Amino acid sequence: MAPRANWKGFLRLSLVTCPVALYPATSDTEKVSFNQINRKTGHRIKYLKVDAETGDEVTSEDIVKGYKVDTDTYIEVTKDELDDIALDSTHTIEIDEFVPKSDIDNRYLIRPYYLVPDGKVGHDAFAVIRETIRSMDKVAIGRVVLTNREHIIALEPLDSGLMGTLLRYPYEVRSEKEYFDDIQDVKLTKDMLDLAKHIVEKKSGAFEPELFEDHYETALIDLINKKRAGTPIAARSTPKSGGNVINLMDALKKSLASEKDAAPAAKVAKETAKETAKAKKPKKRVEGQREMLLPISGKGGKDAAARETAPKKADKPVRATTRTKKAG
């Protein structure tokens, strides 16, 4: 299934304009997710929108937005009123300025998107804007409206396209002073810092995200597959505590010694992981959350009976081919 654009409109630099589409650069749909179900029947839980006072169900056409000004007082705002104050950035990303990338504090970064030309026209104008940004070695700052709110977006070249990163407004970023004021000013010896630097050097390497493993996701898949197969689940033993660190210098020395001992094994494991990653072919992305083919044994009523012929085991939970809405 082709990816769906989150936003379509125009990218404009002064008088140069081109139609573009904005796509999310990250996805959580590959992660295992859960629905809430009735323990007694195995059926999914359905939520109803009800009036908080009367308890009566309210239809979608009778639901409007309201801003709370007092305990029981709301200012009603209609869709038409919101449309009337719609901004130009609803349909156009206007590049306002260019700034050094180093000027953007990491705390302002929200999430990345891919920006590409939309349709067959406008590729020339898109290339002009992209290469202008690239040649200046800066980041273009503009505005875009997503989910009815205007966001600041930072644009930078990425291969033949643009990567746009949504930025937070200053009022969304908390000051570090209210958290750091109570941190004590500690005097560190040169020996302590030298030992710590040696540990860092032993652990230093290139950033290779393809070698990272989501251990919790792996454990979830293993748990679900065991339950589907009817395998007993062994209780997890409580890990032993390393105890309190009494002497910082001793702890640093022990850490350095353990890193030296672990280095050869870690190097072999990393090289093996690299070879495995290279050998694996890229998986075709499938839209939709992972859903189990079979419910837990003894649950699910008619649905379970209808799926009696489905395979009992799978290496991994099978993902649905269409996007489904999460409940709960």
Image: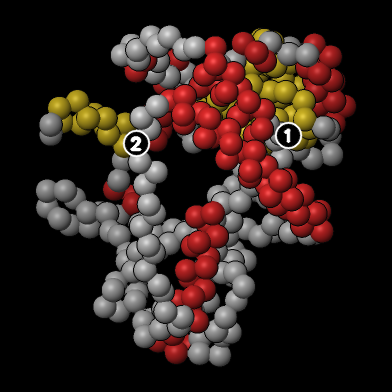
The quadrant of the image that shows the C terminus is bottom left
Number of numbered tags placed on the structure image = 2
Of 143 and 193, the residue lying toward us:
193
- Picture coordinates of residue 257 (x, y %)? 58, 36
Closer to the camera, 133 or 49? Answer: 133
Percent coordinates x, y for residue 20 in the rendering: 72, 33
Work out whether 141 lies above or below 279. above
Above or below for 312 versus 233: below
In space, the residues marked 1 and 2 are separated at their CA atoms by: 32 Å
Dot 1 alpha-carbon crowd within 10 angstroms: few under 14, some 14 to 19, many 20 or more: few
149 relative to 32, above or below: above
In this image, 194 relative to 248: left or right?
right
Q: Residue at x 52, y 18 (%)?
A: 192
Q: Residue 96: horizontal and vertical position, in percent? A: 64, 12
Q: Is residue 20 visible?
A: no
Identify the amino acid type marked 1. Ala
Q: Which residue is mark 1?
A: 206
Dot 2 alpha-carbon crowd within 10 angstroms: few under 14, some 14 to 19, many 20 or more = few
Label for residue 286?
none
* Residue under numbered circle 2: 244
Above or below residue 175? Residue 32 is below
Q: Which-is-in-front pick, marks 1 and 2?
A: 2
* Residue at 51% across, 28% down: 252
Q: SS for tag 1?
A: loop
Which residue corresponds to the image point at 15% horizontal and 27% vertical from the top-left?
Answer: 70
- Dots 1, 2 in contact, CB < 8 A: no
Please identify the residue farthest to the right as the structure is shown.
124
Residue 24 as seen in the image, left or right of residue 149: right
Location of residue 205 in the rendering, given as x and y in whole percent from the top left corner? 71, 34
Amino acid type for the residue under numbered disc 2: Asn
Tell which of 285 and 17 is nearer to you: 285
